[in-house]
Image: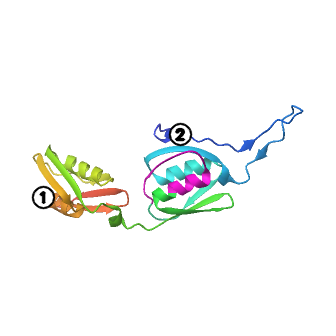
Amino acid sequence: MANLARAIAVLSVCTVATTTPAGGQPAPATAVASPLEVRVTMDYRNRPASEVLQTLTRAAGLTVTIAAGTLLPVTTAVTNARLETALNAVCENASCRWTLSDRAVIVTPVPIDTASLLPRAISIALSDASVLEVFRALAAALSLQLSVEGVLPDAPPVNIRFTNAAPADVLNFLTQAVKCSWQFEPGRLVIRRLPL
């Protein structure tokens, strides 16, 4: 893998077992009965689910087909687990289901109600922060990635303090002040500059 962040996934593929009988000659190698029995070790932090699924299936000699839909980013770690267990962990994180058909893993995203994934209330306090810093802090408090479309307006540093406030109330206040709109998408908070 070209990207070091992708190389975090260390896959241990144990597909052949051998033994040595009393005569000292190695016994014939036997393949793992099912590709789902392959052992894997992985450690991913906020990685695209499609990338994780492709890496896992490729290591087991399988292909993956991902149906249309949205998959959440994956944060999971397993050590020396069966591929089946690893796929279950990934799909639990990514909000999908998987099945094995011949040598292909078929992945189907499950529709996501993004509002149900958010906390009911958040607290945030910042002093002398830029608008971008405020949106970054808010996205972090919501465990979302921040995506800003367009250029945020130049504004003087702000002081902000909300305690146990609904995320939508905080976002409405902030975006109205800087003439932007906001939207939750699976795994991210999108801020868009409104046309002037």
**Secondary structure state at the residue bearing disc 2:** loop
Marker count (numbered): 2
Image quadrant holding the C terminus, namely bottom left
Q: Secondary structure at mark 1?
A: helix
C-alpha gap between disc 2 and disc 1: 44 Å
Residues shaded magenta:
71-90
Position of residue 84 measured from the top left corner of the image (x, y, whole percent):
61, 55
- Judge left or right: residue 103 versus residue 6: right
Compared to 196, does 45 lie above or below? above
Amino acid residing under circle 1: Ala
Work out whether mark 2 precedes mark 1 in sequence or the reverse, and give the earlier one.
2
Per the rendering, the mark at residue 177 is 1
Q: Inspect the image, locate mark 2, and give the three-letter code of the amino acid beneath it.
A: Met
Q: Is residue 110 above or below residue 58?
A: below
Residue located at (53% from left, 44% from top): 42
Instruction: Give the residue displayed 44% in from the left and 68% down from the top.
Output: 111
Q: Residue furthest top?
A: 24
Quickly name the residue at label 2.
1
Up the image or down, 19 lies above or below 117; here it is above
The answer, for residue 112, to whether it is visible in the render is yes
Q: Residues within 10 Å of mark 2 (few under 14, many from 20)?
A: few
* Closer-to-camera residue (42/182): 42
Residue 97 circle label: none
Which of these two is toward me, 188 or 31? 31
Would residue 27 be counted in the magenta stretch?
Answer: no
